């Protein structure tokens, strides 16, 4: 069974540009989560999808971040326009049921210069 | 609000030594889950264990063991006879059951096993 996959693995963009991160959860997992780790700090929750619906987006830092999960399969996280403080590693995770263990992808390292 | 504290930022031990990673949590909820994840150099977060707040039994899995003590709000992780492959960053995390399943992570402990 394939794990959670994320694309790209690395992205380097200039301030003001747009970047779209993609996450493919484990097949059959209705729950999809996005997290972010800024350099040296803890991994922080961004948002949670159940199928295509946003269950909790309390962690989204501001309206420059837009997450979608059309059709309840893969998800995208768009940052527009990117700022320097958006640099970090963005993790995606999925779980079969809420409250169960979340399986993480390898992350996307975003560098905004 | 929930909080997880991993006071040990970095630990180095010689191979074959035992090592304990500390995790202290805070929550007002009586029902919650605790987790440990391992992040090897390759970067992905690998799930190790999930415990619910009603089960205080210690758990052992091979060289790994976990000590959950509600009285001290701790969920410590011990690696016995450490190996170089255990070198990684280890994260402790907490989630509240029913309605708020997001994980609250500690800042992680970087463990280096010296051959």
Image (cartoon, coloured by chain):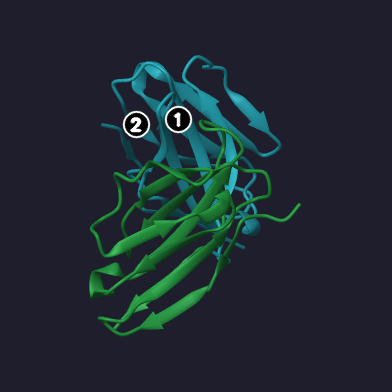
Chain colours: A green, B cyan
Between residue B18 and residue A103, name the one nearer to us. Answer: A103
| Chain bearing mark 2 | B
| Numbered tag placed on residue B25 in the rendering | 2
Q: Which residue is mark 1?
A: B75
Q: Residue at x 23, y 58 (%)?
A: A62
Spot occupied by residue B63 in the image (x, y as percentages of width and height) = 67, 39
Task: Decide if residue B109 is on the left or right side of residue A61.
Answer: right
**Element type at mark 2:** strand
Q: Quadrant of the C terminus of chain B?
A: bottom right
Decide: is A61 above or below A10: above
Q: Residue at x 47, y 33 (%)?
A: B76
Decide: is A77 above or below A43: below
**Residue A77 seen by the camera:** yes
Spot occupied by residue B83 in the image (x, y as percentages of width and height) = 65, 54
Sequence-earlier tag: 1 or 2: 2
**Residue B22 seen by the camera:** no
Task: Decide if residue A26 is on the left or right side of residue A69.
Answer: right
Q: Residues within 10 Å of mark 2 (few under 14, many from 20)?
A: many
Do the residues marked 1 and 2 share a common chain?
Answer: yes
Whether label 1 touches label 2, CB < 8 Å: yes
Q: Residues within 10 Å of mark 1 (few under 14, many from 20)?
A: many
Q: Quadrant of residue B50?
A: top right
Q: Residue at x 54, y 37 (%)?
A: B78
Q: Residue at x 26, y 65 (%)?
A: A64
Q: Quadrant of the N terminus of chain B?
A: top left
- Spatial separation of the CA atoms under disc 1 and disc 2: 8 Å
């Amino acid at each position: 069974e394939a794990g959670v996959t994320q694309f790209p693995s690395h992205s380097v963009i200039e301030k003001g540009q747009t970047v779209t991160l993609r996450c493919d959860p484990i097949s059959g997992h209705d729950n999809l989560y996005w997290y972010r780790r800024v350099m040296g700090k803890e991994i922080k929750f961004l948002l949670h999808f159940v199928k295509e619906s946003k269950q909790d987006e309390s962690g989204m830092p501001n309206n420059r971040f837009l997450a979608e999960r059309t059709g309840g399969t893969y998800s995208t996280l768009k940052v527009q326009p990117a700022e320097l403080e958006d640099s970090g590693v963005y993790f995606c995770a999925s779980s079969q049921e809420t409250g169960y263990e979340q399986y993480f992808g390898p992350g996307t390292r975003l560098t905004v210069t | 609000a929930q909080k997880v504290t991993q006071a040990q930022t970095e630990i180095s031990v010689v191979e074959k030594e035992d090592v304990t990673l500390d995790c202290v949590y805070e929550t007002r909820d009586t029902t919650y889950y605790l987790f440990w994840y391992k992040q090897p150099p390759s970067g992905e977060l690998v799930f190790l264990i999930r415990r619910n707040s009603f089960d205080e039994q210690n758990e052992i899995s091979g060289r790994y063991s976990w000590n959950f003590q509600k009285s001290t709000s701790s969920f410590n992780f011990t690696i016995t006879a450490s190996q170089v492959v255990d070198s990684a960053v280890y994260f402790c995390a907490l989630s509240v059951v029913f309605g708020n399943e997001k994980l609250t992570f500690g800042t992680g402990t970087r463990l280096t096993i010296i051959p």
